Amino acid sequence: MAQKASPASTYAKDMLLAFVFGGGICTLGQCFLDLYLYLKLDEKTAGAFVSITLIALTAVLTAARVYDNIAKYGGAGMIVPITGFANSVVSPAMEFKSEGFVLGIGAKMFVIAGPVLVYSTAASILYGLILWFFHLY
Amino acid sequence: MPSRVGKYTIQLQTNPAVLGYAAVVGKKEGEGPYGQAYDQCHADTTLGEASWEKAESRLQNEAVHIALHKANLNNTDVNCIFAGDLLNQCISSTFGLRSLDIPFLGQFGACSTMAQTLAVASLFVESGAAVRAVAVTSSHFCSAERQYRYPLEYGGQRSPTAQWTATAAGSVILGTRSQYPTASIGLQAVTFGRIVDYGIKDAANMGAAMAPAAASTLIDYFNDTGTNPQDYDLVLTGDLGLVGSSLLDDLMQREGKDIRSVHNDCGLMIYDREKQDVHAGGSGCGCSAAILCSTILQQMDAGKLHKVLFLGTGALMSPTSSQQGESIPSVAHLVYLKS
């Protein structure tokens, strides 16, 4: 009964928007990559620079209170790329500033991104072990 | 003296009088359909304060001060103040009201707090324990978001069933009928709700969790008093929103008490749902408080509404209980106002 009364998410529209926004961010990243390669950076350095640029851009947009308004439409397209991760660190840092630099910003900054860090580190150790195991033979 | 009617309802024989009321709201609420009805609309959501909690405290403080001013009373004239809000340890109430120097009793009823404080205050006045008592509550979108959900600037999407916590406060001052025989609005009866839990776990669909509690209290009241929905001008629920309101209408219809012709919900009234992008409507203690303490009591004063059942609805969960996978217990308290 509750399910019947609850309006469902508009999946088709949401997925299309996520595709467009997520694709847009990736295209933007590719543009930066081409730019850095054009500026004679080697491929590895250029890749790192792309990440740094996108993170910095997100931090600025989050601080300017713009990012969440774009993400309202972009949805998962804005969360999945590296920009979503940057937003999830900057937004609690801004929010909990009122509790001070140590117990506010320091303690709460990774309140959303924390689980990603924990499990990605754990997963990388697991993969490392598997790789090491297969290299023994 | 209050007397019990039926199993759950308490009749107020002396008809405690509404002496004054006030609603103070934020920007989004001020831009809503009832923007003109509020006593004060703040253009700045921070209210010029350094934190969201301070802003919410100020909302509550202003709501009491304006209501006292409208009733031509001083803080020293009030015997007791009943207040609550959504924040941990009810800090909006304690910090907002600490300068008032009025005996204070904190209340927690989640979003049903306006009805709960009003009901308890009316019983104090009815019994003679207080000559004048104040009921007040508040909520603030930003302070609620950071406690219950995500940081404001986090780029998440809201579910279509989610409701928007109102930045608002409302207060009512009650007085003994013998001292205020001409006051136009009085309280006739209260019904305190039982905790109802149908196992809804989605914290982004609180309307669905609260609807059964609202139905339970309404049915208790109608059974106890032997009345029907058609005996009233308005059945006003607190913050069921779009989903909860339609569920309540269905549940009441099943019980043979069709309320559709007289039912409205503060969560559906406070915003323009489509234009203001609030999904299933408004919520929060301040939502029902601001609507009741503005347009509803104004219409009662003006003689446009006479018999109003005000039903505050509260979802009694916390972020901890939700994270531990618990369902959402809910409660609804009813106050019968008559002019």
Image (cartoon, rainbow, N blue to C red):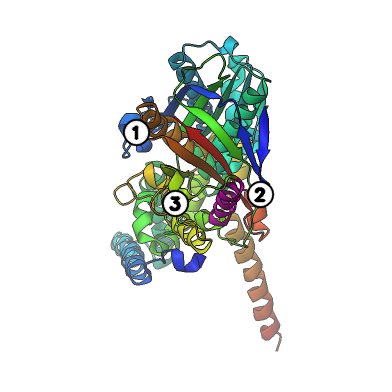
Q: Main secondary structure of the magenta part?
A: helix
Q: Amino acid at mark 1?
A: Lys
Q: Nearer the viewer, residue B249 or B318?
A: B249
Q: Is residue B217 magenta?
A: yes
Q: Amino acid at mark 2?
A: Arg
Q: Which residue is mark 2?
A: B194
- The numbered disc on residue B304 is 1
Q: Amino acid at mark 3?
A: Gly
Q: Earlier in the sequence, mark 2 or mark 1?
A: 2
Q: Nearer the viewer, mark 1 or mark 3?
A: 1
Q: Chain of mark 1?
A: B
Q: SS class of the residue under badge 1? A: loop
Magenta part of the chain? B210-224
Q: Position of residue A104 (x, y in %)?
A: 60, 38
Between the residue at mark 1 and the residue at mark 3, the CA separation in whole angstroms equals 24 Å
| Farthest bottom residue in view | A137
Q: Position of residue B199 (x, y in %)?
A: 63, 63
Between the residue at mark 2 and the residue at mark 1, the CA separation in whole angstroms equals 32 Å
Taking the image as shown, residue A77 lies to the left or right of residue B137, namely: left
- The numbered disc on residue B241 is 3
Q: Residue at 45%, 45% (x, y): give it.
A: B231
Image position of B79 with respect to B312: above or below: above
